[in-house]
Structures are given as structure tokens and as C-alpha cells.
């Protein structure tokens, strides 16, 4: 508990001008989507992330608000990329939906190193709004709010150096100065997305073609991190900071493994990328599709971690348990977020509640 308190203080104490590694670049023109999202999947999952995003968690006080929100979201797609997800709490006894809950949808538990604040967790709904400007995302957030919906929490984020890797995959810099998205599965490969992201067998009919979304709100102890030499930072992450290549060798998006480094002399055994993905045939099924955003809230700096998968237990939860004890834990403090399910379309959400 003492270490967590020290970390919380370090994260909250970050103020003034950030180091050069944590300074966001000017907003860039967002890359075009890899491909138009299929008709049975919502945008905002495999489409390219925009420069700015607002995540809005809502509680439903009137079931008919689901239909109104779905209709507004359709209109809002002209100005932004809107993705609507549902939380486990929506499937209680208020609206008669208990029998159609997605099979793997639960409330997010507390993992080791978490200090979860209930005010920043869960929600009946999660609305993800991506836009080319922060004002654009904010305007859509206001348009989507309405009667029957009560805000639970909100966080606004941005993607510094929103760009692509050499292999064409979306990537951005986090406030620790390292690339977010390196090692992601390729969202342009429909076969890979069918295997890792889109839900299917075993789900209620309305949920087929959707996906499970995990959001984690994480404070970053940037002052503590910036005091570390670059060589230490690289050992903690497992990649070179200047060009994002893995310590194990090869290009940023190249294939590599750790069989020739069993003792962690090149890539430490507690390095983030090694713990997150040991790169063995057995751990291939645990891969998740990530699209994170940085945030600044007053003196606080952090990461909005977002990932999608067809099975939370096989995906995020398994990866998160492997991360327990990683070197990065000293510099991060997860405090909020939740588990959600993204229906295949807003219409599927609207149809849940009888007229």
C-alpha cells in the first residue's frame, strides 16, 4: 500500500512542461481507415483511430433511451466515429435483458496493482467518440446525451504522433515516449479479426459480430519515469525508444521470439512486451487489438488503454495476469475503466428493448 501511495503521489505531482519524450506532437491528419467497416460491425474497432477521442460512460434510467441513443449515433457518424458498447449492469432486472447478456460480459474485477475508484468504473453503456479535433468529439458527446441517460464518468484523450508503423498499422506515442500499438494484430486481415476480435459461437443471436471491449484508465508517474535513463526505460518496455525496434532484434513489426534469450540477458524477463506476449504458439490465442489514447487532466497525466477481443478471459484477463510483477508496475496506477460489449450495430442495441 505504501508503494501505491507513493506512485499515486508521483503520478499526481507531474506538472508544468513535460519532458521532450512526453510532449504531444501537433495534431496530424488522421490516416484513412484500413477498409470500410463491414456492415455487421460498428466502426471504431478495426478502423484507424482518430487524433482525439472522448469516452463517455452512462447509466440508463429509461430503457427507451437505448433506441434514442442508437438513432442519434447514426446521425453523429457524419461528424465523428461513434462506437456504442454495453456494460454488464445493463442486463440486470430493470429492463428484462438478463436472458440476452453476452456470455462473457461481467463487471471488470480488480487486478494486482489496481487501485480502482468506483466513481471511474463500469457503466450501463460506454460511448466511444473519435474525431479530428477535441472540440468535435466534445460536440458529439453533448449531442448524444439525453433524457434517460446519466453520466457516470468521462475521459478525453489524444493520440500524440498519430501515424502508422512501417507495416501500415496504426500507432501513436504515449506520454512515456514509447509507441502504442507496436505488435498489434493486423486489423486489415479479416481472418485474424474473425479469430481474435469478432464474437460468434456461443453468443446470443443479437451479439454475433460484436466484440468485447476493455477500457483501463491508468495514471502515469511521468516525473518518476523521466528521471530514469533511456537504457532503463528500454529495459522496462523491451523496445528501443528512438525507433521502436524490439531489444530482441529485427524491425518494429517484425517477427521475433525469446527462445534464444531464456535468461533475459537481452530482453529482461520482466519487460512489458515479454510479459504481455511471450510469443509462443500457445499464447497466440491471447492476442488483443489495442487502440490507446493519452490524456492530461489538470496536473494528472495518463493513458486510456482500450482493447478489443472475442473473449475477455482468453484475451485481456490472461494478459493482465501475466503482467503481474512486470517492471512497468512501478510507474503506472490503474484506477478505472470497465468491461463492455460492442454490439454489431446500433440497431442491434435498439432492438433489445421492446417498444
Image: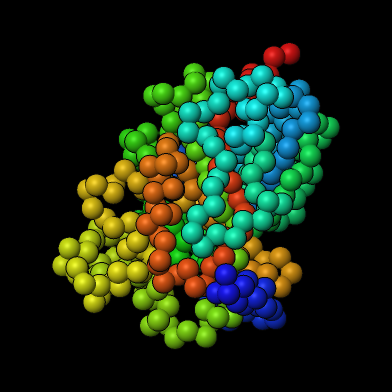
* 185 left or right of 306 in image: left
Q: What colouring style does the render use?
A: rainbow
Tell me the quadrant of the picture where the C terminus can be found.
top right
Q: Which residue shows up at 30% across the image and 69% down it?
A: 269
Q: Residue furthest top?
A: 355
**Residue 248 picture quarter:** bottom left
Q: Which residue shows up at 46% across the image and 24% down it?
A: 203
Question: Residue 43, percent across and down?
Answer: 55, 37
Above or below 340: residue 168: below
Q: Residue furthest left?
A: 260
The answer to which of 87 and 184 lies nearer the viewer is 87
Does any portion of residue 272 appear in the rendered image?
yes
Question: Residue 232, percent across and down?
Answer: 40, 81
Does any portion of residue 39 appear in the rendered image?
no
Q: Residue furthest right?
A: 147
The answer to which of 265 and 193 lies nearer the viewer is 265
**Residue 237 picture quarter:** bottom left
Above or below 166: residue 82: above
Question: Residue 313, percent across and down?
Answer: 42, 42
Tell me the quadrant of the picture where the N terminus can be found.
bottom right
Q: Which residue shows up at 52% across the image and 34% down it?
A: 105
Question: Residue 78, percent across and down?
Answer: 67, 37
Badge count: 0
Q: Which residue shows up at 22% across the image and 48% down it?
A: 281
Amino acid at each position: 500500500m505504501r508503494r501505491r501511495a507513493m506512485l499515486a503521489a508521483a503520478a499526481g505531482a507531474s506538472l508544468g512542461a513535460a519532458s521532450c519524450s512526453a510532449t504531444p506532437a501537433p495534431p496530424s491528419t488522421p490516416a484513412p481507415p484500413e477498409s470500410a467497416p463491414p456492415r455487421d460491425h460498428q466502426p471504431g474497432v478495426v478502423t484507424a483511430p482518430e487524433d482525439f477521442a472522448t469516452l463517455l460512460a452512462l447509466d440508463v434510467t429509461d430503457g427507451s433511451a437505448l433506441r434514442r441513443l442508437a438513432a442519434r449515433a447514426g446521425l453523429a457518424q457524419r461528424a465523428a466515429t461513434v462506437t456504442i458498447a454495453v456494460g454488464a449492469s445493463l442486463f440486470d432486472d430493470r429492463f428484462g435483458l438478463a436472458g440476452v447478456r453476452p456470455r462473457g460480459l461481467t463487471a471488470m474485477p480488480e487486478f494486482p496493482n489496481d487501485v480502482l475508484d468506483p466513481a471511474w468504473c463500469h457503466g450501463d453503456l460506454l460511448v466511444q467518440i473519435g474525431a479530428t479535433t477535441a472540440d468535435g468529439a466534445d460536440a458529439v458527446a453533448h449531442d448524444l446525451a439525453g433524457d434517460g441517460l446519466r453520466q457516470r464518468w468521462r475521459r478525453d484523450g489524444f493520440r500524440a504522433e498519430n501515424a502508422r508503423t512501417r507495416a501500415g498499422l496504426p500507432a501513436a506515442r504515449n506520454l512515456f515516449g514509447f509507441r502504442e500499438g507496436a505488435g498489434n494484430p493486423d486489423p486489415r486481415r479479416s481472418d485474424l479479426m474473425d479469430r481474435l476480435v469478432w464474437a460468434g459461437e456461443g453468443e446470443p443471436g443479437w451479439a454475433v459480430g460484436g466484440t468485447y471491449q476493455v477500457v483501463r484508465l491508468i495514471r502515469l508517474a511521468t516525473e518518476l519515469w523521466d528521471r530514469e535513463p533511456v537504457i532503463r526505460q528500454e529495459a522496462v518496455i523491451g523496445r528501443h525508444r528512438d525507433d521502436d525496434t524490439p531489444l530482441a532484434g529485427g524491425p518494429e513489426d517484425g517477427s521475433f521470439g525469446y527462445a534464444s534469450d531464456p535468461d533475459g540477458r537481452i530482453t529482461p524477463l520482466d519487460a512489458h512486451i515479454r510479459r504481455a506476449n511471450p510469443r509462443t504458439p500457445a499464447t497466440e490465442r491471447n492476442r488483443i487489438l489495442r487502440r490507446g489514447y493519452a490524456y492530461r487532466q489538470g496536473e494528472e497525466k495518463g493513458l486510456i488503454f482500450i482493447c478489443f477481443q472475442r473473449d475477455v478471459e482468453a484475451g485481456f484477463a490472461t494478459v493482465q495476469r501475466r503482467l503481474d510483477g512486470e517492471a512497468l508496475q512501478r510507474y503506472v496506477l490503474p484506477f478505472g475503466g470497465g468491461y463492455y460489449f460492442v454490439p454489431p450495430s446500433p440497431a442491434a442495441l435498439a432492438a433489445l428493448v421492446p417498444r
